[in-house]
Structure formats: structure tokens, C-alpha cells
Amino acid sequence: MVPFIYERASDRRSALSSGARAGAKYLGGGTNLVDLMRETIERPDVLVDVTGLSCGIEETGDGGLAIGAGVRNTVLASDRRVRERYPVLSQAILAGASAQIRNMATVGGNLMQRTRCGYFYDDAAHCNKREPGAGCDAMEGFNRNHAILGASSSCVATYPSDMAVALAALDAVVTVEGQDGAREVPLSTFHRLPGETPQIETVLQPGELITAVTLPPEGFAGRSTYRKVRDRASYAFALISVAAALDVEGGAVKDVRIALGGVAHKPWRANSAEAALRNGPTTEAAFRAAAEVELAAAHGLRDNAFKIELATRVITDTLCKLAALQETV
Amino acid sequence: MHFVVNGGEVDLTFDPRTSLLDMLREQLHLFGAKKGCNQGACGACTVLVDGERINSCLALAVQYQDRQITTIEGLGSVGSLHPLQAAFVDHDGFQCGYCTPGQICSAVAMAEELKRGVPSFVSEDVSAEGFSPTDEELRERMSGNLCRCGAYNGIVDAIQETFGATEAEPGKREAA
């Protein structure tokens, strides 16, 4: 680990002022950042500890919830309001990591976690994300866990968060603050696709701090679910995950939300599939056809082409189960 | 810097790069928590902070000043074992023993999480009257602690005996 100065922020203003310095980085639970610092992939000069800030979950007044960026993952997943009104979010968090890590990790830090691509971690490998212009060894290497949607010739890494996949489906909004004030960014546009600059993963500007994530009033309780397919039953990153919600009215799809994890450089909101489904029938054939529309642009590599069919089937099956749930109500 | 470890107070000076695990082992010579993977994958370094389990290898020690830190040495001792330590012995919950301090710290905190009603991916509601965790439930909640000897059956039995339903008998439980 490269030496750094540790500062514990006593309030938001001092955090932003410390964070504005060159080489500064914000520290949450540290579950990813400390590991990356140990590998010298991250080399901050100043570490600004923001874990004591923004730790509340509050009603927004219009029926939504505002979640402080410092809220621990366990606290968020356990919150009675989240479990009752936004169960897909609680499920997604509980599907990720281990109990120990969920106790440490914060909401803001979860959004800022970096890829688990083995070539990103291996300093003997070429990686455009770690060292822009160096090349990408994953492209022709072991790429079973890599992206099938939205990748570029520079980077095929996936973004690992489960929580963010549910947030994407729920139309959550991220509040970020800098010294010039606050702005709001929809979760679905907070993370970037890799393009030619895979080292830039979010729309955060230098010095900006995530302070909150806001959930809109509609949480799809009772008609949403988080489905995660992985190599072992617990404590593994997703091969494919689906956060889905389905509203059925008069035998037709009234509203639908689908977001995918494990497929791209960001939580992948399946807009094409949603558009294909809206006002259509709730049959397995329709669900499958919509999933195929979404995956039409998918590109498989040597080891991960199976994820295209896997994602199609997981989307289809998840929607079938949600539809069946509403037939029995 | 001021720390509270196993009920005792200590003042230490060290480089901010020091992990909580290294502080406990190298500064305080508490060798119970182990350095297995040193990247949060194995759970051998699990300790309790204010009663909650964390991976001490991923924790910068400076972040845990003035918090109540408990290691395996604070849970029991030779001649005065914690009930879960005794149950691990009775049920062969280990072979080499390297992961055991982490397993036991983790399970002690897990029992508190169950009491508080913290949900899991297996059970979203554990607050019901008479709730008793199935083996599947325990395995999910303990998935952050690996045992490369594969003593999982004994580990689950030891935890069931200590924290599960009072009537539980190893091998005779059924999934709820």
C-alpha cells in the first residue's frame, strides 16, 4: 500500500473541502478500496473517511425514501420500510457479498465499487482500466465472467453490484455534492459504458461525493423479485442477475421493469424488453420474445457466450413467476 | 490512537496503512484472528465491532478507534470456553482449526442478527414467533466463512446446538 494521509470528516462541508484536494479519495466501509490500495491499483494521497456522515433513511414527503450514502448495507436491507415497500432492493443486497462485508459496506461505496475482472487486479496483465492504453488481456483471455452487452474494444469488464441492479429497476436517483452544490443523477445514467475510456466508470466529477440515493414512491411490493444466478449458492458474484417488477391488468402488461446484473459495465436497464412487453400479453412466448429483443445486441466472447441464452432464460422465467404470482392473488 | 479491545483500553501509534487485523496480531499479539486470504474472501479474520461481525483484513484500524472490538480471545479462554467453542469440540467443527476463531466470532454475531430480525437471502422474515433457523439458513448466513478442511457439517451442528431451537438434535432437523 502506498502511504496516504487519513482524515476523518466531521461534517459534509469538511468532507467536500478535503475531497477537493488533488489525489484525495473518499473512504466508506473500505471493503473494495482497501483491497485495491493494498494491490496499489488505487493510490490516493489523502483518504477522507466519510463513514460517519449521511447515515439516515428518511421519508421524502411524496411517499419515497431518501437513503443516506453512509447507510450500511445490512441496515438498508433490514429496514422495515425497505422490506415492505421496496423488497427487491432488500433481496438484491442480501444476495450480495457476505454478512461481514454487508456490515461494513456503505450505500455510496457499493455504487463506487470497481470491477472484479481478474486482469484489472493482476498488475502483470494488460488492462486499459488500470493503465489506459495498455490493452485488454480479458478480450482473448479467461472471460467467462465478462460483459455481453455494451462492451467496447477497450474493455469487457462487468460492474459487480447487486444493490445497484435493484436501484436501476426502481428508477432510483443519486444525489451527488461538490463544492459548487448538489445535483441529482438517475441511477441508470450514473455508471458509464467503457467506450474508449474504461478508467472513467461514473459521471462523478473530481471531488464530488455521493450523499444520498432516493427511491421514488413506487416500489412494486408483492410483484417484484431479484433473481441471481451464480457459480455457488452464496457469496459469489452474479453470472446473470435480474431485478424485475411486473404489473398486470386485465391480462396485459401494464408496467414492467427489468434490470440486469453481470452483463455489462453498469447495471443494465432492459429498456428494449420493457418497451416490447408494455400493453402486451403475459405469456411465456411474449416474455421470451422481449428478452430476445434485449439480447439481440449481445456479443459473446470465447468463454461467456452462454450468458446470452442464460440471460434470456432467466428473464423469461422470472417474468413467468411474477405473472403467475398475480394470477393467484 | 485509542482502542478498546476485549474490554481493555490501549493507546497505540502506527502507520494508517495498518489493517485492524495486523493491529490485533502485530501490535497486541492477539493471534486468534487469522490472516487467510487478506482480501475479504475467507472470513478467517472475522472479529466483532460493537457486537457486529466484520472482516478485519479489509478494515483500516484507524477507522475503528474508540469502538468495542472483540476477538476470539474475548469470547472464551482455555478452561472457560464459550458455549459455542465447547460445541465445536463436541461436534468436530474443525480439523486444522485455522478458520475456527473466525467461524466462532461470525456465528456469535449471526445469532444476535437473528435475534434482531436481520433478514437473509433465504429467509426474509425471521421475526415470527418460534422461528428456528434451518441448516440451509445457517449455511447462507455463514457463507462468509470458508473452511478448507470441509468441516461444515460439524460447524452447522455446533451452531444449531448452541443457537438453534432448544429441541434440535443433529441430523434430525427438517427444513421448515
Image (spheres, coloured by chain):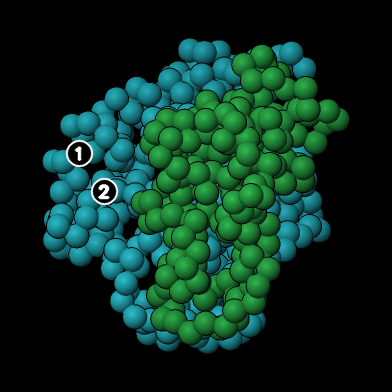
Chain colours: A cyan, B green
Observer able to see residue A268: no
Q: Residue lying furthest right in this view?
A: B129
Identify the residue shown where x is 20% and y is 64%: A132
| Quadrant assignment, res A105 | bottom right
Identify the residue shown where x is 79% and y is 51%: A63
- Asked whether, in this view, residue B138 is left or right of residue A7, the answer is right
Q: Of helix, strand and loop, which one carries label 1?
A: loop
Q: CA distance from mark 1 to mark 2?
A: 9 Å
Which percent across, then down, holds residue A130? 24, 62
Please give the chain letter of the residue carrying mark 2: A
Q: Nearer the viewer, residue A102 or A248?
A: A102
| Quadrant assignment, res B170 | top right
Q: Of helix, strand and loop, which one carries label 2?
A: helix
The total of numbered circles placed on residues is 2
* Residue wearing tag 2: A118
* Residue wearing tag 1: A142
Identify the residue shown where x is 72% and y is 46%: B112
Which percent across, then down, holds residue A151? 28, 45
Inspect the image, locate mark 2, and give the three-letter code of the amino acid beneath it. Answer: Gly
Identify the residue shown where x is 57% and y is 54%: B72
Q: Earlier in the sequence, mark 1 or mark 2?
A: 2
